[in-house]
Amino acid sequence: MLAKTDSQKTIQTMTPQQWIRLITVYLLIPLVLLICGWDFGWWQAWVFSVVIVVVGIGGRLWAERRHPGLLAERANFDKASDVKPWDKVLAPLMAVSLSFPLVIVAGLDHHFGWSPVFPIWLNILGFILIILGYAFATWALVENRFFSSVVRIQTERGHVVCDSGPYRVVRHPGYAGNIPPLVGIVLALSSIWTLIPALVALIITVIRTTLEDRTLQAELPGYRDYARRVHYRLIPGIF
């Protein structure tokens, strides 16, 4: 779809079908968790579901309001011709690894009782990690109008370095924000076995971050200077 900005510049926005697909994904994640757990009185799963839907959909509405056209850019990644070949594999792999494997394992763990029930204070700590992590990632999405879902230099959109907001802390805050929830889900849903898909997701995140950072340093003007100012990619003092 096309829309007009205040300056009468035509921009592309998400189609109704793309909005439906986006909302469906965010509803499907908690649905899979509840079906695999098969316990509709599992309050931790319901709290997790609310957090996922509110932060996921709400954050993207906020981002679109601040940067019209950003969600269309993210949704139309398959039409871009300059996506890095390795990211055609890593981008969908990372998106899947951060969602469905985690809730499938956590749900099955709850249903079959593989892990002991954690004390409530650990569940609460887990939810704090989830909320803080997703909030940080959402902040990055809202702050950076070039926050694409794939690795490419957006020359047609006047791609420049974003060094404000969470980008003053680490160079890839969108990815960094996904790390605390990997631990948080384990604690919030009382699932030791979820550590396995969480570790896989972390490895994929580190690999993609490394390759993306190399690409930006080589191809995006000003990024090397930015990297000299902000030293760490994901975790301050560590990586």
Image (cartoon, rainbow, N blue to C red):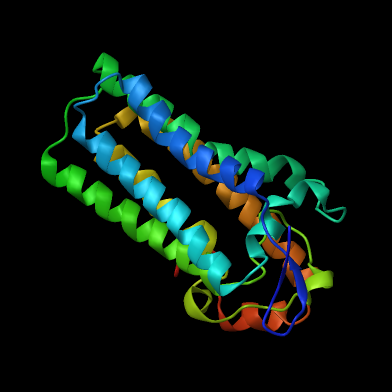
**In screen coordinates, is 48 left or right of 231?**
left
If the image is split into quadrants, where does the N terminus sit? Answer: bottom right
Q: What residue sits 33% from the left and 51% below the top?
A: 130
Place residue 155 in its image quadrant: bottom right
Picture residue at 26% right of the left edge, 47% below the top: 126
Q: Determine whether 23 is above or below 117 in the image.
A: below
Residue 48: x %, y % from top left: 31, 42
Residue 220 visible in this rendered orientation of the protein: no
Q: Nearer the viewer, residue 4 or 231?
A: 4
Furthest residue toward top: 112
Q: Is residue 41 visible?
A: yes
Q: Determine whether, in the image, residue 153 is placed left or right of residue 95.
A: right
Would you say 50 lies left or right of 101 here? left
Q: Is residue 142 above or below residue 106?
A: below
Q: Where is 41 relative to 14, above or below?
A: above
Residue appearing at x 37%, y 20% in the figure: 36
Provide residue 34's location: percent of width, then percent of height.
Answer: 33, 26
Which residue sits at x=63%, y=69%? Answer: 68
Task: Specify whether 78 is left or right of 189.
Answer: right
Q: Nearer the viewer, residue 202 or 113?
A: 113
Whether residue 69 is situated above or below residue 114 in the rendered picture:
below
The location of residue 92, given as percent across then percent down, is 65, 40
> What percent of the width, then of the height, locates residue 163?
58, 80
Task: Please give the count of numbered marks on the rendered protein.
Answer: 0
Residue in the foreground of this view, choosing between 124 and 76: 76
Residue placed most toward the observer, 39 or 8: 8
